[in-house]
Every structure is written in C-alpha cells, then in structure tokens.
Image (cartoon, helix red, strand yellow):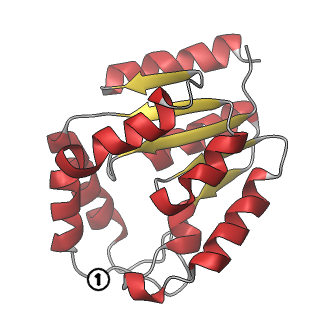
Amino acid sequence: MKYKRILILGSPGSGKTTLSLTLRDILKYDVYHLDKYFRVRDEKEIDYDYVRGKMREFVSGDTWIIEGNYMKTLDIRLKRADFIIFMDLPTEICLKQAKERFEATKGQQRFDAPLNLIDYELDYSFMDYIANFKKEYRDYLYEESIVKTKLPHVVLKSHLDIAIFTKEVTVSWH
C-alpha cells in the first residue's frame, strides 16, 4: 500500500531529516522540516497561533512528509496522517549523529533551519534534551501517535531497520 501523508517522529539525531529526504526522492512528496519553520532560540518567542495555523496549511495537501515532533501541534498532524514512522534509535546513536551534524554544518546556514539561525557552538542543553528524550518524552510521543490513533506505522530501531524500510518503500510503494 502506498501511504500519502507520512509523519516521522522521534528523538533529535535519530535520522528523521535524512529519512524524510530519502522518502521525498522515492515518493516525490513535499517535505516539511518543522525545525525550519518553528525552531527558535527561546521558546518564549514562539507564536503558537501562527504555528498551529501553519501546521493546518501543511496538512491540507494530498501528499506530504512531515518530520519533527513539536508536540503542541501533534494533534493537527495526527488527524490527517495515514502513516507514522517512529524513529527509536539508541540514545548513543542519536547523540553521535547530532554531534556529527553540528560539526558538518557549524557556522553555516542549514537547509532545515530558519534563516539566520546558525549554530556556532554545540548547544549542550540540546544534547541534554537528546540524552533524556527516551526517559522524558518517548513514551508520551509513542502513546499519542501510535497507541491512541492506531494508525499504520513502523518503528525503526537501527540503521539496518531504516535500510530495510527504505528498500520496502522503493519496491512496494510505487
């Protein structure tokens, strides 16, 4: 079966962005990287009315991939999604990949970040967020997105799982 509205959820550093780009190339769907639209340095800066309105705009399309957690807008995405990819890689891998991404893009504008939000130093509070993601956020995110909705889903726990899933999409979702 070919799904048309896909959510990719999971810890920062788990590979959500990379997988969304791979799926975009295979399926030719629009991709929305939520960090690009909603990431700010200080959560007090977030205008949630704007964010929720923008999210409604994103989900109104027939086909899309949305990657990112932003739990205060999860309800909007879940109402329209027809498939969930839950990235559940080990914390050590998420930390390593987040650090590698920082090193590769340090001082540069990232395509998946808002304009003028450039990282020059590793954000240790962000790394702490990743280190505590499974303990503090994972179960809630899993419960809300998969258990309560009963939407079709896949849980990817390793790079091998990701490779197998990508191959499956390539072969059987066309």
Say whether residue 95 is visible: no
Q: Position of residue 115 (x, y in %)?
A: 56, 82
Q: Nearer the viewer, residue 66 or 13?
A: 66
Q: Which residue is mark 1?
A: 120
**Amino acid on which disc 1 is placed:** Tyr
Q: Position of residue 41 (x, y in %)?
A: 37, 84
For the N terminus, the image quarter is: top right
Say whether residue 29 is visible: yes
The picture quadrant where one finds residue 152 is: top right
The answer to whether 4 appears left or right of 158 in the picture is right
Residue located 75% across and 32% down the image: 4
Residue located 56% across and 59% down the image: 73
For the C terminus, the image quarter is: top right
Residue located 32% across and 50% down the image: 13
The picture quadrant where one finds residue 81 is: top right
Q: Mark 1 Cα within 10 Å, few/some/many (few <14, many 20+)?
A: few
Q: Is residue 125 above or below residue 75?
A: below
The answer to whether 104 appears left or right of 36 in the picture is left
Residue located 48% across and 70% down the image: 110
Q: Position of residue 60 (x, y in %)?
A: 82, 52
Q: Position of residue 142 (x, y in %)?
A: 39, 36
Q: Is residue 145 above or below residue 147?
A: below
Secondary structure beneath dot 1 equals loop
Q: Nearer the viewer, residue 144 or 121?
A: 144
Q: Is residue 167 above or below residue 83?
A: above
Q: Is residue 45 above or below residue 156?
A: below
